Amino acid sequence: MTNTVYVLNGPNLNLLGMREPEIYGADTLDDIAAMLEDRARELGLEIEMRQSNHEGHLVDWLHEAQAEGAKAVLLNAAAYTHTSIALLDAIKAIRTPVIEVHLSDPSTREPFRHHSYVGLAAAKTVQGLGARSYLVALEAVAEL
């Protein structure tokens, strides 16, 4: 196992900072990546940060995390959280721990966001803390 933590981000997260900042905050994905890189260094971890608007890329990257011996995956599947059985199956197919991450708290939002396929297989969920959700998840990985 390596000290690499894959941080996988799903659809529309490339628009963070512009997209509904009242829900998702003003931090961009680059801001979050910089924050994670700094904290990872302090924890003796390395970050592999990726974003895609395509479900299959996220599935492939989950498989890659396993193949490369990643310590864990932080996964913000965004809207795919609520729709993707493919991501559920990919998480179940790998031994690498996956921590589900959300900037907002889906349970306080629209009813269709209350169900998480990702959460059915994730080792842990961190949500509702804005960009800090990623940091809390990374700190949980450091304790594995």
Image (cartoon, helix red, strand yellow):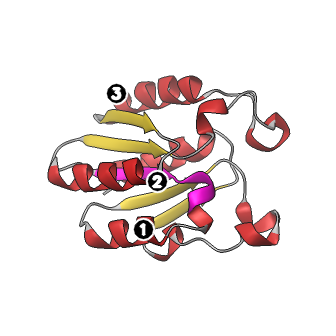
Amino acid carrying label 1: it is Ala
- 98 relative to 115 in the view: left or right: left
- The answer to if 120 sits in the magenta stretch is no
Among numbered discs 2 and 3, the one appearing first in the sequence: 3
Q: Residue placed at 16% from the left, 47% from the top?
A: 68
- 84 relative to 127 in the view: left or right: left
- The answer to if 75 sits in the magenta stretch is yes
**Camera-side residue: 107 or 3?**
107
Q: Residue placed at 81% from the left, 38% from the top?
A: 20
Q: Which secondary structure, mark 1?
A: helix
Amino acid carrying label 2: it is Glu
Q: Which mark is residue 41?
A: 3
Residue 123 visible (yes or no): no
Q: Are marks 1 and 3 in contact (CB under 8 Å)?
A: no
In the picture of the structure, the residue carrying the numbered disc 1 is 86
Query: What separation in Å lies between label 1 and label 2 (alpha carbons)?
Result: 8 Å
Residue 134: x and y in percent read: 53, 43
Residue 9: x and y in percent read: 50, 44
Query: What separation in Å lies between label 1 and label 3 (alpha carbons)?
Result: 32 Å
Q: Are marks 2 and 3 in contact (CB under 8 Å)?
A: no
Q: Which residues are magenta?
A: 72-80
In the picture of the structure, the residue carrying the numbered disc 2 is 55
Look at discs 1 and 3 and give the one toward the viewer.
1
How packed is label 3: few (under 14 Cα within 10 Å), some, or many (20 or more)? few
